[in-house]
Amino acid sequence: MKVTRELFDEVMVPNYNPAAMIPVKGQGSRVWDQDNNEYIDFAGGIAVNVLGHCHPALVSSLQEQSEKIWHLSNVLTNEPALRLAKKLTDATFADKVYFCNSGAEANEAALKLARRYALEHFGEEKSQIIAFNQGFHGRTFFTVTVGGQAAYSDGFGPKPGAIDHVNYNDLDALAGIMSDKTCAVMLEPLQGEGGIISPTPEFIQGVRELCDKHNALLIFDEVQSGVGRTGDLYAYMGLGVTPDILSTAKALGGGFPIGAMLSTDKIAKSLKVGSHGSTYGGNPLACVVAEAAFDIVNTPEVLDGVKQKEQLFRDGLARINDKYQVFDEVRGKGLLLGCALNEKYKGRARDFLVASANNQLMCLVAGANVVRFAPSLVIPDEDIKQGLEKFEAAVASVVNA
Ligand SMILES: *Cc1c(COP(=O)(O)O)cnc(C)c1O
């Protein structure tokens, strides 16, 4: 069967509009398409391929497990899931883990847990969930409604209720709508889809204090910022503020679908037997790959490497910007970086993405004004150098068009 991009329009629901080329092979931070064109990957499958494509340790874990057992359901537990849960709880504030298959599912579990906990401990009045404009928490109806872009949740009928939004980094606005009826505050400790926005130290500290004051749970959505992305295992560790519930996915499986919600003993108790679940949650194939990825990422070599590679990106991007004057700033942390376009190029992030693809570089956007990079955490320095050369050529082509 001849498989082409045209087939997409023929047989796929039109909720995506993928690029013209179809990748068929990946190794490290290089990808090849059907015509054997080679690309450098600064996108990492949207902050997922934390160790690049087909990392040998992940490949061998998957292969080994594939000959043992694939699936059991949650009527039974399994060794990979238990080992991974033990490692996650040993390495974080959490005592308990719930496994699922995606970021949205991890957030859905987090929100349901928060609501159930509030109901059990304080009564049904305590239901308000506060989140932030431009935040992104996934595409299930609950999570997309908690997300801060109404455009994504409009048009699907009545929405889940008692959800309010304020501006990120606006502590006064948050204080203004919080009360003892607040069940939870949910935020990304580094906004990804919303444009790579870091929290100010006063804000993130203040959110924790307000949650404590009102007995509200603090939920950190670390689906994009977690698993080494910022140079800390989880971004909260670099902020000095600990959440009550944390969601993690994307990089967790290094390319294999898995998500997890982490919480404390006391809070987790509210998800009693039968109260929530997922057929594939804790699937042995997913957990064994995630365990292998976790073992590699959670080492000083990889985490310190992220900080060094961040500097390579920042130096290279600064050089490009000195020459072409296209960005206002390069923001973000670790290997989640955003180039915010200046006034002259406002709204044109996609043009830079397309120009990069034409120069055989895969990158991302975060909204209309930010070009985003989320490469493998172990991307070789040489690939960063070559990728930045391609990016420079892309920037030149946009500037000179
Ligand atoms: C990607 C993302 C999600 C959604 O994850 P899915 O696996 O697509 O469901 C949720 N929160 C954040 C911060 C994300 O970046």
Image (spheres, helix red, strand yellow):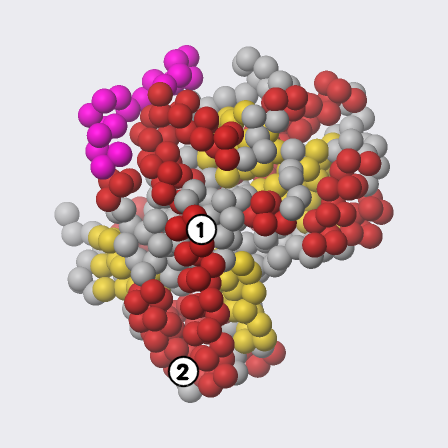
Question: Label 1: how many residues lie within 10 Å, few (<14), some (14-19) or many (20+)?
Answer: many
Question: Hey, what amino acid is under mark 2?
Answer: Ala
Q: Quadrant of the C terminus?
A: bottom left
Q: Which residue does the image show at 39% across and 13% down from the upper left?
A: 76
Rounded to the nearest angstrom, the CA distance separating label 1 from label 2 is 33 Å
Magenta stretch, overall SS = loop
Look at the picture and state if 370 lies above or below 218: below
Whether 42 is drawn above or below 207: the answer is below
Circle 2 sits on which residue?
396
Q: Secondary structure at mark 2?
A: helix
Residue shown at 56% from the left, 26% from the top: 95
Question: What percent of the width, then of the height, locates residue 65?
Answer: 25, 28
In the rendered image, residue 326 lying in the magenta stretch gets the answer no
Return the residue found at the far left: 1
Residue 391: x %, y % from top left = 38, 73
Is 285 above or below relative to 55? above
Left or right? Give the position of 54 relative to 107: left
Within the magenta stretch, is there residue 71?
Answer: yes
Tag 1 residue: 303
269 or 183: nearer the viewer:
269
Region rendered in magenta: 60-78
- Looking at the image, which is closer to me, 380 or 287? 380
> Which of the marked residues, 1 or 2, is nearer the chain's N terminus?
1
